[in-house]
């Protein structure tokens, strides 16, 4: 397996789709269904990229992104927001909080692979 992508989304079906697609492209994929799980997984295993939904239980993806980017040990890990929210404000907030890219749901698999390949360290 290649680099590790952490998919953080409370939609189980969405995480399975992203995991299946990225595994086909030889990425190792870890899944978390909320920010608390994501923090735990990112501490357990080296992560090269995070795909992060905005609307999740406990705290939003935007809050998670900002907090994640403040930690010295994780600040250099790229975070890509993958969300159905498509307003200009949502996109601007994502970049303001530290995201490197924004992929709108629904997406086609080629766009998912392209955004991962473009942003993975």
Image (cartoon, rainbow, N blue to C red):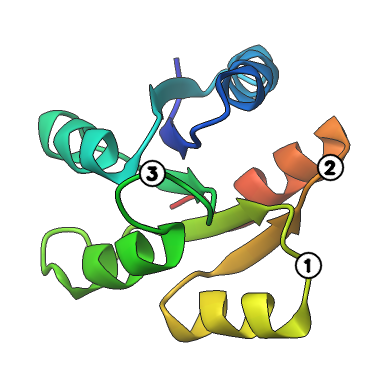
Left/right placement of residue 68 relative to residue 73 reads: right
Left/right placement of residue 118 relative to residue 93 reads: right
Seen from the viewer's position, the closer of residues 92 and 99 is 92
* Number of numbered discs visible in the structure rendering: 3
Q: CA distance from mark 2 to mark 3?
A: 20 Å
Query: What's the residue at 22%, 41% (across, down)?
Result: 36
Q: Secondary structure at mark 2?
A: loop
Residue wearing tag 3? 57
User: Could you tell which of marks 1 and 3 lies nearer the N-terminus?
Assistant: 3
Residue wearing tag 1? 86
User: Could you tell which of marks 2 and 1 lies nearer the N-terminus?
Assistant: 1
Residue 81 higher or lower than 94, as above or below: above
Q: Secondary structure at mark 1?
A: loop
Query: What's the residue at 50%, 37% (across, down)?
Result: 9
Q: Which mark is residue 106?
A: 2
Residue 121 higher or lower than 17, as above or below: below
Q: Which mark is residue 70?
A: none
Residue 102 is situated, as x and y percent measured from the top left of the image, at: 66, 63
Task: Please report contact status of discs 1 and 3: CB closer than 8 Å, yes or no.
Answer: no
Query: What's the residue at 43%, 46% (across, down)?
Result: 49
Seen from the viewer's position, the closer of residues 63 and 71 is 63
**Disc 3 crowd, CA 10 A, few/some/many (<14, 14-19, 20+):** few
Q: Quadrant of residue 90?
A: bottom right
Left/right placement of residue 72 relative to residue 91 reads: left
Q: CA distance from mark 2 to mark 1?
A: 10 Å
Q: Secondary structure at mark 3?
A: loop
Seen from the viewer's position, the closer of residues 55 and 28 is 55
Query: What's the residue at 38%, 23% (across, down)?
Result: 30
């Amino acid at each position: 397996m290649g680099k590790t992508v952490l998919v953080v989304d409370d939609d189980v079906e969405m995480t399975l789709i992203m995991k299946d697609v990225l595994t086909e492209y030889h990425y190792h994929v870890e899944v978390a269904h909320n920010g608390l799980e994501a923090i735990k997984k990112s501490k357990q295993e080296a992560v090269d990229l995070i795909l992060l939904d905005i609307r999740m239980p406990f705290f939003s993806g935007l809050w998670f992104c900002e907090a994640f980017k403040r930690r010295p040990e994780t600040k250099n890990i790229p975070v890509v927001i993958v969300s159905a929210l498509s307003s200009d404000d949502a996109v601007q907030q994502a970049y303001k909080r530290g995201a490197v890219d924004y992929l709108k749901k629904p997406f086609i698999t080629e766009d998912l692979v392209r955004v991962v390949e473009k942003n993975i360290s």
